[in-house]
Image (cartoon, rainbow, N blue to C red):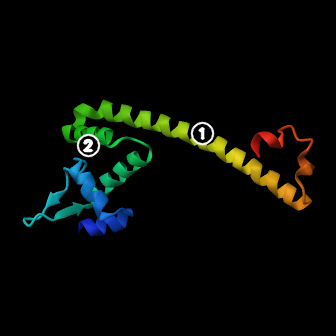
Amino acid sequence: MTYSIGDVAKKLNLTVYTLRYYDKEGLMPFVERTPSGNRVFKESDVELLNVIECLKSSGMPIKDIKNFIEWLSEGDSTLQQRYDMFMERKTAVETQMEELQKTMDLIKHKCSYYKTALDAGTEDIHKNDKIGTAVFD
């Protein structure tokens, strides 16, 4: 089965503009074109675009994603580079998740703090807390 650029944009929740930008940046050399120049995407192209979106959402710069695409075209000789790249991404995402967890912990604490204060009708209920309200409020 093949897809048009519009089909792929809908399927991946992207804009056609984004897909054209990826093509311009060299991230889609694998996509075939019709004689009239229209892009024709196969299922494997859509799967690779999913990987590109994953890398992008992990914070990887476009130039590094382009390196990955180039390594793919080089075949098995670049397996180690691709493995190392994904291990680095894994570490980066784990660090982001730890930071987000700390953020979530503080937000949950403040939700509880304000809920308790609302229920009591005053922040005075927290006067004896270990964490002073002046620091966070």
Q: CA distance from mark 2 to mark 1?
A: 29 Å
**Rendering coords of residue 46 (x, y %):** 30, 58
- For mark 1, does the 10 Å Cα neighbourhood hold few (<14), some (14 to 19), or many (20 or more) residues? few
CB atoms at circles 2 and 1 under 8 Å apart?
no
For the residue labelled by badge 1, is the local secondary structure a helix, a strand or a loop? helix
* Residue 71 to residue 126: above or below: above
The residue lying at 28 percent from left, 58 percent from top is 19
**Rendering coords of residue 42 (x, y %):** 23, 61
The residue wearing badge 1 is: 99
Q: Amino acid at mark 2?
A: Ile
For the residue labelled by badge 2, is the local secondary structure a helix, a strand or a loop? helix
Q: Quadrant of residue 9?
A: bottom left
- For mark 2, does the 10 Å Cα neighbourhood hold few (<14), some (14 to 19), or many (20 or more) residues? some
Query: Does residue 24 appear left or right of residue 116 in this picture?
Result: left
Q: Quadrant of the N terminus?
A: bottom left
The residue wearing badge 2 is: 69
- Front residue of 17/29: it is 17
- Name the mark on residue 37: none
* Residue 96 to residue 34: above or below: above
